[in-house]
Every structure is written in structure tokens, then in C-alpha cells.
Amino acid sequence: MAFTPTRETYSGKVYPVTVGTGDSAITFGGENVLPFNSFEGSTPNRPLVAFEIQDVPPSDWPENVQKPFAGVSDDPVKWAKYCQDELKAKAIALRLIGTHPDRENRSPEDAVKTVKDVLAAIHIPLIILGSNHAEKDSSVLIAAAEAAKDRNCIIGKAQEANYKTIAAAAMANNHKLIAMSELDINLSKQLNILITQMGFDKERVITDPMCSALGYGLEYTYSVMERIRLAALTQNDVTMQQPMLGDVGMYVWKIKETTASEADLPQWGASEERGIAWEAETATALLVAGAELLIMRHPRAVEAVEKIIEELI
Amino acid sequence: MLIIGEKLSIIAKRVREAMMKKDKGPIQEIATAQWKAGAGIIDANIGPAEDGGEDMMQWMVTTIQEVVPLPVCLDTTNASAIEAGLKVHNSEWGKALINSTSNDPERFPILELAAKYNSQVIGLTVGKGGLPADAEERCGIAAEIMARAMEYGVSLEDIYLDPLVLQIATTQDQAIKVVKAVRMFQELNDPPMKTVVGLSNISNGCPKALRPILNSYMLGLLMYEGLTAAIADPLEKEIMTTVKTIDVIMGNTLYAHSYLEM
């Protein structure tokens, strides 16, 4: 007897979100099934993987993930163009980490210049991220959102402490918005409600339930993502139907498994392969949990994940 | 939890006057307010409507659906008025619901209409012999309605069994029997039968201040037993608070601090 798979039907669907402009605009989300279960419904768009770059040289990144960008990462414009032209990136995530008060403490005006220069150099969609300092991000992201007006970027991250200013800036300049909460599904829903109560269109929000690396609490991120997606699909919860972000690179490339040298831990094998595999595996787990947007660092990890998407979609 | 908005009833003076004058304004205003408050179906109760019922029901259905993207519950004992309403009902947002059939042979033609127009129908568990005494008798009548429905070609998934809520002020012992009947109805089929109640009847004849309290607590108990739908007033704040809170407690919706505002 032929095998007939059991089919679930869902009452809800994930909002499709389009970023960028013109021919380079890309849409992700839009499915009405659990990740990659296209046989039960429709998955109109692939998850989007963005290459992470930053406004200051990546001296804080481990050597193994600095190497692929040697010669370009001293300048965000060169770096962005390299990702777009040589690595065929579909999107860029520019992290304004240099604005953090404990780092270079760059000003909002510095951030504006970086954003404008990068936007002038690329045609693919741009994600503009702050330094995750709630107070500083308010001023930096307001300025950055204005500098990127009408380029249909993604601005982030809005958190409980600063969502009002950042959401208002994203709304005024026609951008999408990342809403981040800290590994708590109820607070994630609450933040989405608060943002939409400001008049921000719920279909322009991307949910970041907060990422973590394999071996460092990934199961919490996985579980929250999975539950958000089930609420969206099975309970048709309109406050939980946004696409989700996995901000993978920054969580993976700081843990022992991606930073420890072969001299210190020879039994762990080649450190470069180890780091790439760790990033690709973390990203894949989140895709399966429901992430539609990934921010990643190592080109070979991105390549591996794109291949997995190609096979699963 | 499905709320069938009950406000468009001929019993209400403002609605009755609007119906008589064919004044769309108040009808559309009340329909919209109920939709915004969370109703999933709008009840159109035109009473027995012996004269001109067909016109009246058609006017109500089209007037409501002009402004509200919801199905309508056609509420009258006049079968030809129901058929007229079904003819113009826009089912883009869901099937029409007929209120109601029962185990009284006079009400069987309603099943024929439900089959003919592919609509849903409320099965009131009363027969010719008067009010049911307990949950078991309600189940016996429900089984007969289900058998009759299948005979007429109405799918069991299109039937909402109604245990008939009675007034607590006059027949107090019936309240808990109704709650029990809602549980038992579901066991009559797999997948479980859908259930509905005319909620506010529980507090009919009670002091005004008590009515929302009685309605809400009764609804909470019924929801716990798996009630599918209630004909109720979604503009009554306590009703929607109860629906949302019980849905959260039972895990049907995800909790957030602002859940009552959604």
C-alpha cells in the first residue's frame, strides 16, 4: 500500500515581508505551514540569509572569521561591496557596533555617514542594527533610519526599553522593524502588541525572540521560535505571525568552540572547520524552528546553509 | 470561542424602528460595533415575521454584509424568510447559520433549507413535548436531530446543538444540566459535535446589575466544557473579558500582558 502522509491544515499564516527596492527587493515569510512542510500548504519564499558587516574593523571577531574579509573589512563600504559582488550576498546586515559607549562610542552622525556610504555602494537590501545598547540605539537608529529613508531597510532592534522611538523612526521613514525580546514568548507577543498599538503596521515587524548558539541555550531559542510559529499557524494569533530572525553570527563566533585554538584543544579538530560547522548547524536548527531571516558571518557557513535551504524547500 | 452577536433583534426598540423604516444607519452601526468587538457571526432576529418576512430578511442580510465581512445568523421561525435570506447571503466569509431547527416536525423543513443552501444550522434540543428535563433527555433529542439531519443531507459538522439555556430565576436546577449537556453533546460524534447557547437567557428576568455577572460566569463554565459558540452581546465588556480570559487559561490563545486589548 502506498504511503500517504498525514496532512495538517493551519488556520493562520506568516506575513510576507519585502525588503529593499527595485530589482533587488526580496520577500521572505508568507508560508502557511511549519518550516519546509510545503506538502501541506504553501511556502512561497525562501528564508533570507544576510551577511553581517560592521561599522568598525572586526577586531573582536575570531581570526577564522576575520580571514575571509581580510583587505575589505577595514572599510564598511568595501566590505559591503565585497559581500554583494564577490560573495553574491542577497542582503547585508550592517551592525553599528562602533556606536556602543563601551566601544568606539561613535556618534549618530558617524553612523549616518556609514549608512549613507554603504547604501550608495550597494543595491541589495540592507538591515541596519544598533549596538544593542538600549539608550544609545535610540539616537543612533533614529538618525540611521532617516539617512536610509525610502530604501525599505530593516531597522533594529526595538526592545521593551526603546521601542517607541525606534518604531516611530522606522515608521516615519518607511522601514521594517525588528522587535526583540529576551527568550520569553509572552513578552515577545506583548512587545508586538505594544508596537502595533502605536500604529505601526503589524505586517512590517520581524520578531527576534533572541538567538543563542548551539551548546549555549539554543534549545531555548528553538523552543520559543517553535511555539511562536505554532501560535501563528494553529491558533491564528495575528500578533505572532511575523517572520522571525536568527541573529546567528554574533552568538556563534564568541563561544569556546569557535575561538579555542587547535594548540589548546587538539582533540576538537581543525578550528576553522569547527567554527564554520558550528555557525551552519546553529543556523540550520533555527531554520527548522521557523526562522525566515538569518544574519551570518562566515561565507562557507552561509554557503552550507543556502545548500540546505535549496534541498529542503 | 465564537461569539454570535445578538444585538440586531426585533425585541430592541431602536432595531425594530430601523427595520420598520428600512433605515440602514442603526443596523449597520450596531453590526459594525459587534464585529469590531469580536463577534464572528451577526445574528439577525426578525421575530416571527409573518408579513413580509422574506423582504425583511433579505434587507437585513444585505444591509449587514454591506459593511461587515461576516456570515449572518438568520433568526426567525418563518421558513420562507430564511430561504429568502439564504438566497442573498454572501458566504465569502463563512457559511450562513440558521436559527433554528428542533425535534418538532414543523421545524424539519429548516433542515431541507440547510442542505439546499449548504448552510449551518442550530439544532435546539426541544421536541413537541415541551422543555427537556435534564441533560440526558437533551442528548436523546440531539441524537434524533442528528439522525434527521443526515436523512436530509446536512453534514453533522454543520450542526450546532443548543441545549436551551433557561432562566436561573425561575428554573435554577436547569443551569448545571445545561452545562452537563454541552459536555455530553460533544460525545455524540467524532469529531465532537459543535455546541451553541443563547447565553443571556440565563439572566433573563434578573436585576440589571446581576445580568453581566450571571452571563459571564455561566459562559466560563460552558467554555470549560468545550462550548463552540454563544449567542451573546459582544459589546458587554464582561463577556469579551470572560471569553479572552478563559481562552488564555485554557491555552487556546497565548498570554501577553495586553491580551484583553487584542
Image (spheres, coloured by chain):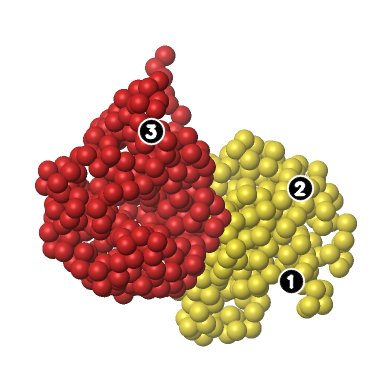
Chain colours: A red, B yellow
At 27% from the left and 32% from the top, the residue drawn is: A304
Relative to A296, residue A170 above or below = below
Of badges 3 and 2, nearer the viewer stands 3
Give the residue at x 32% y 62%.
A104
Quarter of the image for the N terminus of chain A: give it: top left
Is residue B43 found left or right of A226 in the rendered image? right
Left or right: residue B35 versus residue B204 is left
**Residue at position x 11%, y 47% from top?**
A85
Q: Nearer the viewer, mark 3 or mark 1?
A: 3
Residue at the disc numbered 2: B181
Residue B212 numbered mark, or none? 1
Helix, strand or loop for disc 3: loop
Residue at x-position 24% and y-position 53%: A57
**Mark 2 Cα-neighbour bin, 10 Å: few <14, some 14–19, many ≥20:** many
Q: How far apart are marks 3 and 1 (CA)?
A: 66 Å
- Quadrant in the picture for the C terminus of chain A: top left
Classed neighbour count for the residue bearing mark 1: other residues with Cα under 10 Å, few (<14), some (14–19), many (≥20): some
A257 vs A251, nearest the viewer: A257
Residue A191, percent from left and from top: 49, 62
Looking at the picture, do discs 3 and 2 lie on one chain?
Answer: no
Nearer-N-terminus badge (2/1)? 2
- On whether disc 3 and disc 1 are found on a single subunit, the reply is no
User: How far across and down, in percent of the image, does residue B242 sit?
Assistant: 68, 63
Say left or right for B172 vs A16.
Answer: right
Compare residues A267 and A127 and report the one nearer the observer: A267
Q: In this view, does B206 lie above or below A295?
A: below
Q: How far apart are marks 2 and 1 (CA)?
A: 23 Å
| Type of the residue with mark 1 | Pro
| Residue on which disc 3 sits | A260
